[in-house]
Amino acid sequence: MNRIALILILQNLCNLVSAVDESPEALYRRTIKEWRTKRSYEPWMKYGDDLLEKFDTSSNRLEIVGGFEEGVLAIEKATVARGEADNKERDIALSKLYYGYGYVLMELDASECQSLALDPHTLLIGAETVSKNDEPSTDLCLENAENSLRNAVTLDATNKVADDLLQRITGMDSVHKRKPKEFVAELFDSFADSFDEKLLDGLQYKVPQMIGKSVLKLGDKFENVLDAGCGTGLAGRFLKPLVQNVMVGVDASQKMLDIAEKCTVSSGCGLKDTDEVEASDKTPLYDDLLVLDLEDMSIENTLKGKGDGFDLIVAADVFVYFGSLANVLKTFSNISTKGSKLIFTAERATEEEAPLGWRLLSSGRFAHTKKHVVEAAAAVGYELTLYQEIVPRMEKGEEVQGHMFGFALSNASSGNSEL
Ligand SMILES: C[S@@+](CC[C@H](N)C(=O)[O-])C[C@H]1O[C@@H](n2cnc3c(N)ncnc32)[C@H](O)[C@@H]1O
Ligand SMILES: *[C@@H]1O[C@H](CO)[C@@H](O)[C@H](O)[C@H]1NC(C)=O
Ligand SMILES: *[C@@H]1O[C@H](CO)[C@@H](O)[C@H](O)[C@H]1NC(C)=O
């Protein structure tokens, strides 16, 4: 046997052995190298799988945890350094590593979790709060696991193992479903007092005007109007002149409604003191304000005998708290009269970004594809009458991508029946 052949055989043997016995550190170095040469994120996906496989039998599980941390860090850093824009392959690979990181963090016992927190290189958020005299606990690792799994499902909505694990940790429904009403109520209760100021001045929030304009263009007056997710009542200001019977505001947050309650025809709800109309009209802007989840609405609990259905519903920047819109649109259709109009805004996602039809953004809100919106609405009798891409507000100096929809409830299918 000549020398070259021998070297080749030895090399192959080494490769074989290393594939099995490779340390997380060596695996990391090899992955980085392959990533650079192949210019593909595929090696990171394999890296995630390999680390997870090693975890079960490893005698040093913290080394594996560190491996996930290094992988996440490498990709996140490169993304920032290269100013890399949307890259689906990267998001899927990173999602996989965040899942792995979440999984191993959940498995650690109290003393492992404490050692990890005391490691100066760890990515654990809140590690600085742990000292070596503390009673060992898994709390910090579980919190970080939840956080990591949230990142995983945000980056890749089709990462089902991450979604399942997150549901197990939080004991809540899939994050791809809508926000629970307790969550929404708490969130908006907490910033009701600064809501108008923040949105109108800071974030150039224009949705109420946009919706108001679209409603005006319909050229009709309306008997019964529903401002769904009315919040502090910013949209009501633009609807009031067209209302002939009642305007009802519904919201999950009592504190937001407390502010809307103070609005009259000539003050509040977006009108500054300086805009005060001359003849001060103290008629309340809304005829009724109800704390209610949008999916729990019925004709009885909203109109309370004052009408037999709504002929206009608006929802300004509310569907960002819903994943699938199927249920909420069904409820809308169920409380509407035939021919009733519906106008709302949402944040925009492409079908590529949002294979489910909606996608959880890192802001915690949902963005929807036009396709999902139109299909979910059609399923309960709505026909599209208006579509417009909009910028609902600014966020961190950038324009948020949104869209506005107008629908009419077709006269053929009856809205007031179980579909
Ligand atoms: C961003 S604010 C918009 C408020 C108002 N429409 C406007 O344009 O100023 C969203 C509102 O929707 C409400 N909301 C979100 N999900 C809801 C749900 N499932 N049921 C009732 N209200 C909800 C929140 O409480 C909040 O007041
Ligand atoms: C439709 O409305 C009726 C009565 O108002 C109610 O009993 C039923 O549960 C509603 N269905 C849906 C899907 O909201
Ligand atoms: C449906 O009925 C409403 C009210 O009866 C009417 O205003 C509207 O024009 C009708 N729409 C269609 C598409 O027939």
Image: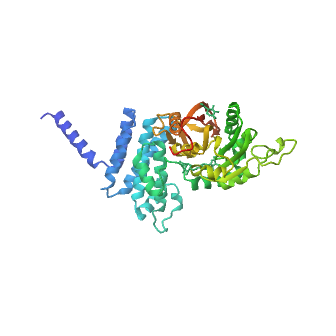
Circle count: 0
Q: Is residue 213 above or below residue 283?
A: above
Out of 331 and 167, give the one closest to the viewer. Answer: 331
x 36%, y 41%: residue: 31
Do we see residue 53 in this rendering? yes
Q: Is residue 94 above or below residue 169?
A: above
Out of 35 and 42, give the one closest to the viewer. Answer: 42
Report whether 228 appears left or right of 161.
right
Q: Which image quadrant: the N terminus?
A: top left
Do we see residue 252 in this rendering? no
Give percent across and percent down for residue 96: 41, 45
Give percent across and percent down for residue 90: 44, 38
Give percent across and percent down for residue 402: 59, 35
x 40%, y 37%: residue: 41
Report whether 249 appears left or right of 346.
right
x 40%, y 63%: residue: 109
Give percent across and percent down for residue 203: 68, 41
x 32%, y 58%: residue: 59
Out of 94 and 413, give the one closest to the viewer. Answer: 413
